[in-house]
Amino acid sequence: MGIKTKIILLLLSATIVTAQPEAQTWYFGIGAGIDFTSGKPEMISGPLKTNEGCSIFCDRFGKPMFFTDGQTIWNRENKIMLNGTGLMGHPSSTQSAVVVEIPSNKNLYYVITALNVGREQGLNYSLVDMRLDNGLGGVVKKNINLQNRIHEKITVCATPDYKTYWLITTEYNSNNYLSYRIDSSGIDTIPVVSPIGSKKEPLIVNNYGYIKASPNSRYIINSHQNNHKLELSSFDYNTGKVKLIEEIELGEGSLTYGLEFSPDSRIIYVGSIFPESKVYQILHPALAEVDDIEFYELGGWSTEYILGALQLGPDKRLYITNDADSTLGVINYPWLVGDDADYQKRALQTLPGTYTTRGLPNFLTNYFYDPLLCDDYLYDERDEDTSKVNLVQEFPPDGIDVGYAIRWMKGALWSEEMIPISGGFTAEFQVQLSRGGKGTEFTNRGGTGFAFVLQTKSGYELGTGTDGLAYEGLENSFVVEFDQNKDIHDNNGNHLSVMSSRGKITTDYNINGIDYTNNIPEIEPDDNLYKCLVTYHNRQLKVYISPESYYLLPQLVINDFDIEEFIDLDNGKAYMGITAATTEIFQQTTLKYFRYCSEPLIDVGTSSVSIDNITDYSMLISPNPAIDNIVIDLENQYDVIGYKIYNLKGGIVKQESLDYTRLQNLKLDVGNLTNGVYIIKLELGTGVKTGKFIINK
């Protein structure tokens, strides 16, 4: 039940950030396409003609670099790429192709292809070099075989450091999952083999349907049509091993095709194509905070069309192709449960003369990972309304350039009003760092960087900026610094540091430092985009930075962290913003977007079932009411992994990881809880038990 109360429906702003440029333009079906670059989906026409699988890769502006149906590759001019014919995919293969950018190389790309219906020489890859043909690209290796016969389904996900990808498929007439490691040295042609689940008999029906890795790379779902099941497995991105969690029964006669996860990887979506077309939403205890599997049928069923692919978009919506209907269905809020997800069956109509078929483009799944799912925007470069923004600079701004490429330039962007901080917050922003400046010919490596800052004085504050990224000298401030400074006093080398001061803050880590790490991507002033996330919740600070359009794990985690020990908040609030400055390097820092929300996310209004209505309490708790301690009697012995305590609005007020074996009675200290009614979920080795208790001091 927890997922229904923790994940809330927030009012979406008019502009939706599309932070995944690689997936901002789609070509699919018979001449159909979608352009997401404006921030909203706009139907376009495209040159592709395919019955099912296809793939596309876009540049940093979201414009197509090349695309494929699995047999032919076309370049950005919609012409056949040099040596781009004769690939061993098939336009009637479910997931006939996927494009993978080779880690650490922006010029080389793998096009991985899958033949249809388990044909021989089924899994292959080709290599594209974008330096050829005057930047239009050319195929330099073609049809390198990886596996003889596979089912016509392939998915690719990344490791947390983005240096390794995994290609995952299933072997024909087998129960083997095959995982191929891809890194800067190439594709390991010897797969990691994981024999799990039921054997897929050599029937045509067992080739159909998708396989998908979750956006956080931790799970895999796979349709198994002959047995009317969906296989849910865990995936170890360190080893490539797949481990079955459960074969989920979908009902006799049910045939599935499209599969997808929610952007936060907590909800499964399934498209059933027989006997009626319908969309199922599945909550599973391995992914979400539910006690048992929960099924939701979205929008009823239809016999007017056959559902095809399910694919997350860069706007966080989930798109569903209606085969031969020339329309696309859209699930507007796929991270919400039941009717709150808002499934519109025929939300988009293709342009005249273009048609939907059964497929949508196949992408690296991590492009669509979003742990934030919050849309309160401080700034978005596509939105001309900057009413929430105070921009402070020494020179007039041209858009939202936080720091100009001018010597000793300094700038800051602040929220117009104070933002709640003490109860928790999440802030995500993306900056672009550009080299050079007015009248300069070169840029030395030195002070490249930017800073996330909280302060309480006003929304028009600007620090000295000499060496301090424009935060130096601010009073009563909290700073997360992302810096490449290799030659002065703070942290030597490329680093991320957390600092604070109730007086005037300096850049000297020895004076104001809280914690730091050098384990971050190299920050370079060369038109690079950096996506960052700062989250403070449950006495834990996490900081992420990635040069990619997604991130999986934080670079810095500070536990048992109370932000009010380091900054005096104003009624729990502070101004939130970004600062930057130049010294001798003339770096230009441009903010692309900035969004935030306050945590915990508590709103029972969107819950299908209030946590107060849970009746399946399965633990004896005493004393009840309690004052400072409770004892839980489990009646039998269990392995206890941890617990979470919720208030009646669904907010987590206490949680702890445990490691007990064969425990029957558990004593917990709840003395820090205020008077009220609480729900406790005890995580056991065999599942979850739920209890309800009262604090009355």
Image: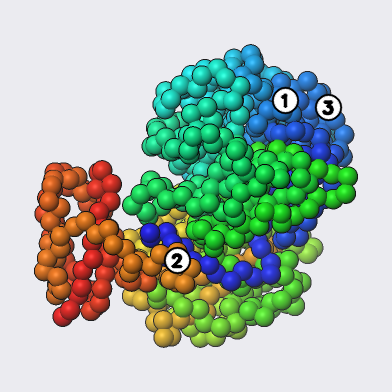
Residue 696, by quadrant, is bottom left
Tag shown at residue 526: none
Q: Position of residue 558 (x, y in %)?
A: 36, 60
Q: Which residue in the structure is indicated by mark 3?
A: 82
- Label 1 neighbourhood size at 10 Å, few (<14), some (14-19), many (20+)? many
Q: Is residue 626 left or right of residue 555?
A: left
Quadrant assignment, res 389: bottom right
Counting residues from the start of the chain, the first of labels 2 and 3 encountered is 3
Residue 90 got which mark?
A: 1
Residue density around tag 2, few if under 14, some if 14–19, many if 20 or more, within 10 Å: many
SS state under label 2: loop
Q: Is residue 128 visible?
A: yes
Amino acid marked by disc 3: Leu
Q: Which residue is mark 2?
A: 607
**Tag nearer the camera, 1 or 2:** 2
Three-letter amino acid code of the residue under disc 1: His
Question: Which mark is first along the chain, 2 or 1?
Answer: 1
Identify the amino acid type marked 2: Ser
Instruction: Left or right? Give the position of 104 relative to 216.
Output: right
Q: Residues within 10 Å of mark 3 (few under 14, many from 20)?
A: some
The Cα–Cα distance between marks 2 and 3, rounded to whole angstroms, is: 54 Å
Callout in the foreground (2, 3): 2
Can residue 265 be seen here?
no
Task: Name the side, left or right, on which 405 lies relative to 596.
Answer: right
Mark 3 / mark 1, whichever is N-terminal: 3
> Closest to the observer: 591 or 685?
685
Q: Is residue 612 left or right of residue 342?
A: left
Check the picture and name the quadrant holding the N terminus. Answer: bottom left
Q: Position of residue 512 (x, y in %)?
A: 40, 70
